[in-house]
Image (cartoon, rainbow, N blue to C red):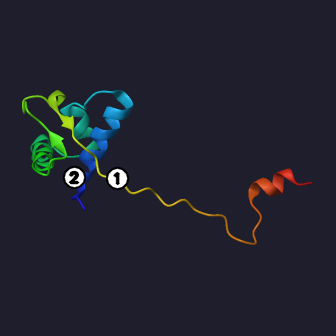
Amino acid sequence: MFPDLERKLLRIIHNYWSQRHRMPTMTELERTTGRYEPDIVAGLQQLEIEEYLHWPDKSTLFSLKLLHAPQFEERAVSKARRGMRSDIEYWTNY
């Protein structure tokens, strides 16, 4: 598993690319991770070493290419308890 910063960076980059069809800026990465530029650059370099990213032009983040993102863990969905009525049943049954 990744350290917290690398995991956050991968998720943020993946979400920006899939939702906004662009890479985030350094200001956006600083805001969303809560870290400063040197930490972010170190995290991105580590992800490049581990071959999750390709970053040919280190002067800009727009040259970042996401090679592959790991499968992110899905949050557990709570299940209704057995033997108890749900709110829907209360309001729809007369």
Observer-side mark, 2 or 1, equals 1
Please name the residue shown 66% across and 64% down the image.
80
Vertical placement of residue 62 versus 36, above or below: above
User: The C terminus is located in which quarter?
Assistant: bottom right
Contact (Cβ within 8 Å) of mark 2 with mark 1: no
Please name the residue shown 36% across and 34% down the image.
18
Residue topped by disc 1: 71
**Left or right of residue 84, residue 73 in this image:** left
* Residue type at tag 2: Leu
Residue 62 coordinates in the image, percent (x, y): 18, 27
Please name the residue shown 33% across and 27% down the image.
21
Query: Badge 1 local density, few (<14 within 10 Å), some, or many (20+)?
Result: few
Residue 5 is tagged as 2
Task: Quadrant for residue 20, please give it.
Answer: top left
Query: Badge 2 local density, few (<14 within 10 Å), some, or many (20+)?
Result: some
**Left or right of residue 19, residue 25 in this image:** left
Residue 92 coordinates in the image, percent (x, y): 84, 51
Element under disc 1: loop
**Left or right of residue 84, residue 13 in this image:** left
* Residue type at tag 1: Gln
Residue 45 coordinates in the image, percent (x, y): 10, 45
User: The N terminus is located in which quarter?
Assistant: bottom left
Residue at the extreme right of the image, as rendered: 94
Task: Quadrant for residue 53, please give it.
Answer: top left
Q: Nearer the viewer, residue 68 or 1?
A: 68
